[in-house]
Amino acid sequence: MTSTLTPGAPETAGAPSAGEGAEPTAGQVARRRWRASRGVLAVVSALVAVAVILAALRPETSWQNLDPQSASPGGSRALAEILRQRGTPVAVSRSADDAAERATAASVTVITRSERLTEADIERLRRIPGDLLLVAPSRRVLTGLAPGVRMASSSFEDTGDPGCTLQAAALAGSVEFGQSDTYEAPPGATACYRVEGLPRLVQVRLDGARTVTVLGSSRPFTNEYLDDEGNAALAMNLAGARASVVWLIPDLPDPGSASGDRTPGDLVPFGVKLFFLQLVLAVVAVALWRARRLGPVVAEALPVVVRSAETVEGRARLYRAHHARDRAADALRAGARDRLVPLLGLPRSAAQDPNAAQEIVAAVAQRVRAAGAGRPRRRPGRNVQHRPGRPPALRRGDDRRGPVRS
């Protein structure tokens, strides 16, 4: 009677011991994954923290910023009142058309919040008389109203000295800019307050007496920073250079007017851009760090060298100890098929396909007939048959005989 417990040789031989080779627990897997990923998580967390800090330190842009009628820290009411007290009238305009009607040859048109201007507004302002003062203009407004002046980069140096012959800047002296845009000035333009060779204030003279002045920072015009350094002097000298001031702070364009002045990149805060830049650099650094571990294949010496004959004898003893005659027979059949299939010209997949067994038998029979043609038959009338799946009978004395050899 065959025992019901008939494990296969690979399962018995490869069974893990109680101390070594056991399957890792869920806690061990979790700890291993944590050790492998904690470096990357630490870098990402640091980048997120830096981005949050930079976003918190960056001042918010309110709708009242640079509004000459606003007393908020970002407004410009203090500067407008000082100009009026000194005899320079300040007219506030909320649209480009109104500013164009108010502007004269003896006025300075101060343009703030230029990102709200449409293409039609820029074209209208290009033809107005008098001087123009662009306070932190956008790229498109800068191109349309200040020919030859191009935006270069951003500067974070708080203060700067004039370093130029412009009277408005020379009288003001040192000015606190904070974060400011820098520009590339065309030939013949007056460039002041340079940072690494790039000016933060540029004045271009157009068709004789008209001038266009570009200031890269709005801080000297705000209520909060007006009394810092020479901010008030610079703002009054630039805005009050003529007999009157037309202050243009355009309202938000109507929906569908398509100002086209702000690209999707302009809508993304600077801190978010810096975060993604740092994230890309961190991913590249981690990729290079991990790639260093990929090197040539290293040949390692086996701890124990086991001869193939010993392996065969060990498997045979396991088969015999568990009376696994059916598995031993299956192993012999599978080995025979693996060796016969290449010799018969059949695909290697046929060796493991049960449906191809009859085809293998027919091919073997054909080869045997071809090899034995012209020889006398020892047992005439006997045919080759395929008898799958029947284990050999256990003969008396098999338990005491030597191990089955492959």
Image (cartoon, grey):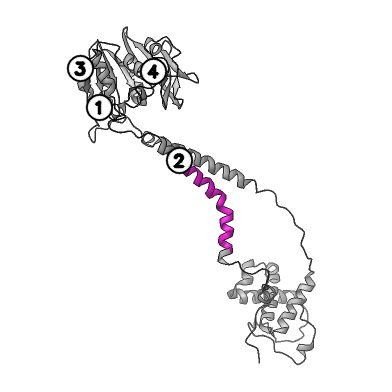
- Secondary structure, magenta segment, majority class: helix
Foreground label between 4 and 1: 4
Q: Residue at x 59, y 55 (%)?
A: 35
Q: Position of residue 177 (x, y in %)?
A: 41, 23
Q: Are marks 4 and 2 in contact (CB under 8 Å)?
A: no
Residue density around tag 3, few if under 14, some if 14–19, many if 20 or more, within 10 Å: some
> Which residue bears the numbered disc 4?
230
Q: Are marks 1 and 3 in contact (CB under 8 Å)?
A: no
Residue density around tag 2, few if under 14, some if 14–19, many if 20 or more, within 10 Å: many
Q: Earlier in the sequence, mark 4 or mark 3?
A: 3
Alpha carbon distance from label 2 to label 1: 32 Å
Q: Earlier in the sequence, mark 4 or mark 1?
A: 4
Alpha carbon distance from label 4 to label 3: 29 Å
Please state the extent of the stretch shown in magenta in the rendering. 28-52
Q: Residue 87 occupies which quadrant of the picture?
A: top left
Report helix, strand or loop for mark 4: loop
Report helix, strand or loop for mark 2: helix
Q: Position of residue 114 (x, y in %)?
A: 31, 26
In the rendered image, the quadrant that contains the C terminus is: bottom right
Question: Which label number is shown at residue 84?
Answer: none
Foreground label between 4 and 2: 4
Question: Which label number is shown at residue 250?
Answer: 1
Alpha carbon distance from label 1 to label 3: 14 Å
Q: Are marks 2 and 1 in contact (CB under 8 Å)?
A: no
Q: Position of residue 242 (x, y in %)?
A: 27, 11
Given the image, on which type of amino acid does mark 2 rest?
Answer: Ala
> Which residue bears the numbered disc 2?
51
Q: Nearer the viewer, residue 353 or 328?
A: 328
